[in-house]
Amino acid sequence: MMTKNYLFHRVNPQREKLWDPMDVALFERCIKYISNHYETVLFEELMESGNLAHGKKYATIMFDDGFKDNIEYAAPILSKYKCKASFYVVTDCIDQNIPTWTYNLEYLFQHTGINTIDLNFDFLPAELKTEKLESNEERIAYVSRLKPQLKKLSDQQRSEILERVTATYSDVELPQIMMNWDDLVQLKNEGHYIGSHTVTHAMLGTIADEKKIMDELVNSGKRIEEKMGYFPVTISYPVGSFNATVKDLAKTAGYKIGLAVKQNVYDPAKDDLFEISRIELYNEPWWKTKMRITNVLENLKSIIRYK
């Protein structure tokens, strides 16, 4: 039984220059296509059923982070097509109505009016060390290069940069665009599932301190249990960051399943339950999105890679 697990983040009619949300019309086209071509089921129910019919083409719908537009724009479309989805939330972001650091980083650079910033960290490449970014265009270009680099750093190094950026660009008020617990209870009551995406959206695979990893795993699960009435079976690794230690600690914390982002089909016959594949979909032209949905794009990449 092969399963395609489709991952979304934001669904919104407003466009953004950097991390652009999926347009609402495109999201509906995705859900319509998926529901017409696959048996769309709730991921956690599929995994726990134990009596899956062979030969069926299953698909699941998932969301990471917990943005408000998930319930405003995505949920009505899911209801229209009778699809249930799993929402993996960052509990601190829900509690405080503050977006994830991945969103905040870009937002601060885009909206500040401050032209100087000291980013002369020894662990950054020379081309990213800077003291001045004098225009909005320069800042946007810079953060587009910085963000991928941050994902390669240790947790401590990344935290140092994020703290510096937040302190320097103190003129920016972060938007309140996250769901609250009432929203999540509503989604649960509609038949959707609420799972964990850690406490702070930490890149778990880059953290050396096992206690800190456990705090992210356990405390997020307990917070969801307080609000939803159950400890979630699923942990979605933020930014797809995990390693063998993270998987072991996730099991110890009480999770049954770990979700990665591998842009591929999940095959239970050979894939690890703690690194289940998901196919992330973006705000792209329909022809390219359809190639991702059908996995044609990833298959083509594999052919080219191994030539």
Image (cartoon, grey):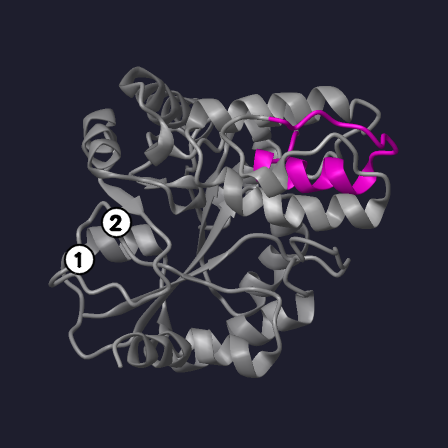
- Quadrant in the picture for the C terminus: bottom left
Q: CA distance from mark 1 to mark 2?
A: 7 Å
- Quadrant in the picture for the N terminus: bottom left
In the rendered view, would you say 84 is above or below 229? below
Residue 275 percent location from the top left of the image: 25, 49
Residue 174 percent location from the top left of the image: 75, 31
In the image, 115: left or right of 72? right
Say how many tags the image has.
Answer: 2
Q: Circle 2 sits in a helix, a strand or a loop, which is it? A: loop
* Residue beneath disc 1: 271
Question: Viewer-proximal residue, 271 or 11?
Answer: 271
Residue 182 percent location from the top left of the image: 60, 33
Badge 2: residue crowd in 10 Å (few <14, some 14–19, many ≥20): many
The residue most toward the top is 211
In the image, 232: left or right of 98? left
* Residue beneath disc 2: 275
Q: Residue at x 41, y 78 (%)?
A: 297
The residue most toward the front is 126
Task: Please give the range of residues in magenta.
Answer: 98-120
In the rendered view, would you say 186 is above or below 276? above
Question: Viewer-proximal residue, 290 or 104?
Answer: 104
Q: Residue at x 23, y 54 (%)?
A: 47
Question: Viewer-proximal residue, 174 or 110?
Answer: 110
Residue 99 percent location from the top left of the image: 63, 35
Q: Is residue 107 magenta?
A: yes
